Each structure stands twice: as structure tokens, then as C-alpha cells.
Image (cartoon, grey):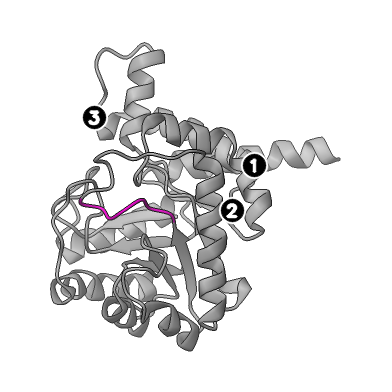
């Protein structure tokens, strides 16, 4: 899943793709590099980001989604927690809603997904984006995230969403410390087995990777977002090996090649 941020303030590439033409060109580049689907977002969900009203979010994403649907040749997802934005994206040709709130912020979103026959990615987040990193605490992060994902999958089913349309995301970096993120990744196979639905993992360029690279990887200081792709690649391979069905990334070329090689090795092993 290639990331297309149509925002001025995303942590990794804020502002680079705010112009619709630049965003479309970037999406097409991601597909050429190996992305199997594109995730278009018009509101940053980084810690401390400012909220965006629905009208502005729609204005940012609608022209980009419409053109990518027409030109990219891969499914397009919209990254939003708002029903009105999701509806506009689906009208423009998107087929998946990627909701960081897992349907909690807007109760009308899950019924919309069911009505339209769209896919839904339900993500775990502690709190909301503006405050999620203030002081995240868990007694058992793997169990609690698993509990949440199972409950939200049940909520989607109750709204009429089919099992085949549901994917779950443990929300790496969303209301978690570095230790929480590492614990979730270390036990990702357990989480995948427990939830029984496709799992999406988004680690790309997140701050915990910079901290790990700084602490144990020999980096001098914490590397900025655009210098965390090597660490990201390690988590991509790990997630795929643990059973994740989708990895959400900024650098599609490296991730796609790594996953292709992993697939080949598993084929040889099984032969």
C-alpha cells in the first residue's frame, strides 16, 4: 500500500504532494515502483497535527482520487475517519476506507461502508491524533490491541460489513511508546492468528524506527523521517513473515522487491 499524503503537515512528506497534480504523479510513481494499492489522505494524523474540516479534506482528495482511479490501474483507498469524506471518495472511485478511528469517531461511517460494499481498514489508536502520544499506557499491549480489533471487527459486522471486506491494523505509532511498538511487532504472528482477518501494518518512517536506529543501529542522533527507510524495510519483511497481508509504505520500490524475494524464498522452501 503506497502512501499519498495530500497534506501540508504529514510527518514524512508534508507539503510535497499538496498540489493535486504532484499527488497524482507521486501515486503513479508508487505504482510503477511496485505498489499494489494506493492510500490517499487529506488530513495528517501525526501526533499534534491540527484538525481539518470535512470540506477542506474533500477538496484535497477528490481530484486526486478521481485521477488515480482513472490512471493508476490499482485499487485506491481513502484515509479518513469522516463519513462525508469517505462518501465523496467512494463517489470518486475509491473502494476502501482506511479509518484510524476504527469507526469510533463517526458512527455513520461503518453503515456507509456496508451500504456501498466497500472495504474497511479498522485501526487501533489510543485516544485521538492530537493527544495520543501524551502518555500511552497498557497493562498488556498485545492483548489489549487484540481485544480492541476483535471488538471493532464485530462492530463492523453488526453494521452490515462482510468479513471479506474487513482488515485490521494494530496502529503502530498511534498511542504507543517505542517499547509498545516493538512488543506488538515481536508478537505480530500471535495477533494475526488471534484476529482471523487480514492484518495491515504501517511502520513506514515512524519515529520509533529512528529511535531504534539511534539506540542500537549505530546512528549518530535520531535520523529524520526520510532517513528511516532502511529500518522500515526490516519491519516490512518481519511483518510479512509474521503473516501481515498488507504493508503501508512511503518507499514502494524497496518494500515490493523485499516482499517479492520473501515470496520466492517461501516458494523454494515449500518445493
Q: Earlier in the sequence, mark 2 or mark 3?
A: 3
Quadrant holding the C terminus: top right
Q: Which residue is mark 2?
A: 245
Query: Residue drawn 32% across and 74% down?
Result: 106
The residues colored magenta run 124-130
Query: Residue drawn 67% across and 43% down?
Result: 263
Q: Is residue 72 visible?
A: no
> How far is the residue under mark 1 from the one under mark 3?
29 Å
Q: Earlier in the sequence, mark 1 or mark 3?
A: 1
Give the left or right position of residue 193, taking residue 44 as reference. Answer: right
Q: Which residue is mark 3?
A: 224
What number is the disc on residue 189?
Answer: 1
Whether residue 156 appears in magenta in the rendering, the answer is no
Query: Residue drawn 51% across and 33% down?
Result: 183
Q: Earlier in the sequence, mark 2 or mark 1?
A: 1
Percent position (x, y) of residue 102?
42, 64
Quadrant holding the N terminus: bottom left
Percent position (x, y) of residue 230?
41, 28
| Viewer-closest of 132 and 122 | 132
Q: Is 23 located above or below residue 188 in the figure? A: below
**Is disc 1 placed on a helix, strand or loop?**
helix
Whether residue 129 appears in magenta in the rendering, the answer is yes
Q: Mainly helix, strand or loop, the magenta region? A: loop
Q: Is 32 located above or below residue 73 in the figure? A: above
| Viewer-closest of 59 and 30 | 59
> How far is the residue under mark 2 from the one under mark 3?
28 Å
> How far is the residue under mark 2 from the one under mark 1?
12 Å
Is the residue under label 3 in contact with that under label 1 (CB below 8 Å)? no
At label 2, counting other C-alpha atoms closer than 10 Å, the crowd grade (few under 14, some 14-19, many 20 or more) is: some
Amino acid at each position: 500500500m503506497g502512501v499519498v499524503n495530500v497534506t501540508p503537515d504529514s510527518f514524512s512528506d508534508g507539503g510535497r504532494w499538496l498540489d493535486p497534480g504532484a499527488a497524482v504523479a507521486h501515486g503513479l510513481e508508487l505504482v510503477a515502483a511496485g505498489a499494489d494499492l494506493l492510500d490517499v489522505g487529506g488530513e495528517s494524523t501525526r501526533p499534534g497535527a491540527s484538525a481539518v474540516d470535512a470540506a477542506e479534506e474533500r477538496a484535497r482528495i477528490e481530484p486526486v482520487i478521481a485521477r488515480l482511479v482513472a490512471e493508476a490501474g490499482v485499487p485506491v483507498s481513502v484515509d479518513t475517519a469522516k463519513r462525508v469524506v469517505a462518501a465523496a471518495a467512494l463517489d470518486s472511485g475509491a473502494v476502501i476506507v482506511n479509518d484510524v478511528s476504527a469507526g469510533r469517531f463517526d458512527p455513520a461511517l461503518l453503515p456507509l461502508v456496508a451500504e456501498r460494499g466497500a472495504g474497511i481498514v479498522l485501526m487501533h489508536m489510543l485516544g485521538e491524533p492530537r493527544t495520543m502520544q501524551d502518555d500511552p499506557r497498557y497493562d498488556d499491549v498485545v492483548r489489549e490491541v487484540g481485544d480492541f480489533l476483535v471488538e471493532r471487527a464485530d462492530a463492523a459486522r453488526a453494521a452490515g460489513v462482510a468479513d471479506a471486506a474487513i482488515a485490521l491494523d494494530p496502529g503502530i505509532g498511534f498511542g504507543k511508546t517505542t517499547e509498545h511498538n516493538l512488543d506488538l511487532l515481536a508478537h505480530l504472528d500471535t495477533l494475526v492468528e488471534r484476529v482471523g482477518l487480514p492484518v495491515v501494518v504501517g511502520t513506514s518512517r515512524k519515529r520509533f524506527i529512528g529511535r531504534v536506529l539511534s539506540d542500537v543501529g549505530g546512528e549518530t542522533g535520531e535520523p529524520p523521517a526520510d532517513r528511516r527507510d532502511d529500518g522500515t524495510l526490516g519491519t516490512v519483511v518481519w511483518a510479512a513473515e509474521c503473516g501481515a497481508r498488507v504493508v503501508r509504505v512511503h518507499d514502494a520500490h524497496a518494500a515490493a522487491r523485499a516482499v517479492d524475494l520473501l515470496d520466492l524464498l517461501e516458494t523454494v522452501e515449500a518445493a
